[in-house]
Amino acid sequence: MTIVNDSRMPALFVPHGAGPCFFMDWNPPTAWNRMADFLKHVASTLPARPKAIVLVSGHWLEPVFSVTSGPQPKLIYDYHGFPAHTYELRYPAPG
């Protein structure tokens, strides 16, 4: 007998393109609209509100395994060479 747990949360792979893709000027200007629309509506496809989100970045290299946590963890800017305003982005999500 197979038991299916319909409340299981999905694992998502979200490619982000070049650095802070949603905060830059592109030609055409609509280059990231489909991805933005997907992300805006992904919550409505979930079986419940997530209690936590685990984000794994393959871009951040450390000599040892590292975990960022705390009441309000800061963003890690694992890119370089982009417009200055993209390094001022904040995401004050609770940790």
Image (cartoon, grey):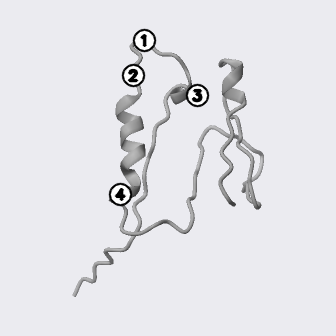
Badge number at residue 19: 3
Query: Mark 2 or mark 3: which comes first in sequence?
Result: 3
How would you rate the neighbour count of disc 2 (Cα within 10 Å): few for under 14, some for 14-19, many for 20 or more?
A: few
- Apparent side of residue 5 relative to residue 1 in the rendered image (left or right): right
Residue bearing mark 1: 27
The quadrant in which the N terminus is found is: bottom left
Total numbered labels placed on residues in the image: 4
**Real-space CA distance between mark 2 and mark 3, rounded to the nearest whole angstrom:** 14 Å
Residue 44 is marked as 4
Q: Residue at x 51, y 29 (%)?
A: 22
Residue at the far top: name it.
27
Q: Nearer the viewer, residue 68 or 46?
A: 46
Q: Position of residue 75 (x, y in %)?
A: 70, 43
**Which tag is nearer the camera, tag 3 or tag 1?**
1
Q: Are marks 2 and 1 in contact (CB under 8 Å)?
A: yes
Q: Which residue is label 2 attached to? A: 31
- The secondary element bearing badge 3 is classed as loop
Image: 22 above or below 9:
above
Q: Amino acid at mark 2?
A: Ala
Separation of residues labelled 2 and 1 (CA atoms) = 7 Å
Mark 4 residue type: Ser
